[in-house]
Amino acid sequence: MRFGNTAIGALTVVALCTGAWLLANGSETNAPPQPSAAEGRPDPVAGHTAARPLPPSPPDRIRIPAIHVDAP
C-alpha cells in the first residue's frame, strides 16, 4: 500500500509542477512560422500567375437503403 501512496503523491507533484509551469509560461506569445518567399502568392502584375482553378464538380448523391438515407 505504501508504493501506491508514493506513486499517487509523485504523480500529484508532477501534475502540480506542470500546471505551475503552464501558468507561468502559457501567456507567452510566439509568432507562427512564416512561409518563405517561394511559398508566397504569385505576383499577377509581374506575369507570374498560379495554375487555373479546377472546374466545379457535380454533387454526388448518396443512397443507403438499409438505414433509409437518401441525401443529395
Image: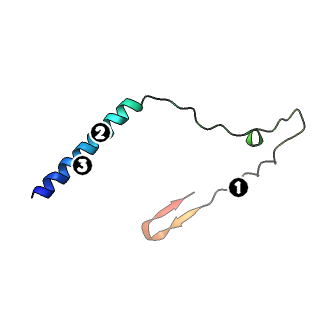
| Residue 44 vertical position relative to residue 52 in the rendered view, above or below | above
State the residue at coordinates (35%, 31%). 23
Cα distance between the residues tagged 3 and 2: 10 Å
Q: Which of pointers 2 and 1 lies earlier in the amino acid sequence? A: 2
**Quarter of the picture holding the N terminus:** bottom left
The residue indicated by pointer 1 is 57
The quarter holding residue 34 reads top right
Residue under label 2, please give it: 17
Do labels 2 and 1 touch, CB within 8 Å? Answer: no
Q: Residue at x 26, y 39 (%)?
A: 16
Amino acid tagged 3 = Leu
Could you say whether the residue bearing mark 1 is in a helix, strand or loop? loop
Q: Are marks 1 and 3 in contact (CB under 8 Å)?
A: no
Query: Count of labels shown?
Result: 3
Give coordinates of residue 10: x percent, y percent. 22, 48
Q: Residues within 10 Å of mark 3 (few under 14, many from 20)?
A: few
Residue indicated by mark 3 = 11
Image side of residue 22 versus residue 59, left or right: left
Viewer-closest of 9 and 19: 9
Q: Amino acid at mark 1?
A: Ser
Dot 3: element: helix
Question: Which residue corresponds to the image point at 41% horizontal and 32% vertical from the top-left?
Answer: 25
